[in-house]
Image: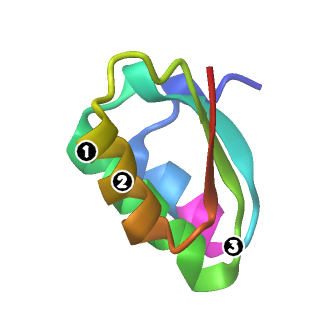
Amino acid sequence: MRFETIATDELIRIAHAGLGFKLSASSKPLADLLRIADAAKDKGATITFTEISGLSDYDIKRIQLASEGHVLFEH
């Protein structure tokens, strides 16, 4: 299943259910990635963001802080 085509609110519901998934970071704006990261920490979901070359180091740090370690990054 490709999660890039799923609406952000639905991805947040999936994360709130404690389910993990992989998502291309280039498919969503930073604000949405931060919301997804925040949702992941609530139920202990592990989200992997791929294709992160468009994110700055600062953006990656913000996502990591929002997720409290529940987001992984993959090139």
The quarter of the picture where residue 28 lies is top left
Q: Do the residues under discs 3 and 1 have CB atoms within 8 angstroms?
A: no
Side of 51 where 26 appears, left or right: left
Q: Which residue is pictured at 45% across the width and 59% down the height?
A: 64
Identify the disc placed on residue 17. 3
Q: Earlier in the sequence, mark 2 or mark 3?
A: 3
**Where is residue 44 drawn, in percent x and y?**
70, 77
The three-letter code of the residue at mark 1 reads Tyr
**Where is residue 66 drawn, in percent x and y?**
38, 68
Give the crowd class for mark 2: few <14, some 14-19, many >=20 residues within 10 Å. Answer: few
Question: CA gap, disc 3 to disc 1?
Answer: 28 Å
Answer whether residue 3 is magenta in the image: no
Give the crowd class for mark 1: few <14, some 14-19, many >=20 residues within 10 Å. Answer: few
Q: Which residue is pictured at 74% across the width and 55% down the height?
A: 20
Q: Report the residue marked by disc 2.
A: 61
Question: CA gap, disc 1 to disc 2?
Answer: 5 Å
Magenta segment, prevailing SS (helix, strand or loop): helix
The quarter of the picture where residue 74 lies is top right
Q: Do the residues under discs 1 and 2 have CB atoms within 8 angstroms?
A: yes
The quarter of the picture where residue 34 lies is bottom left
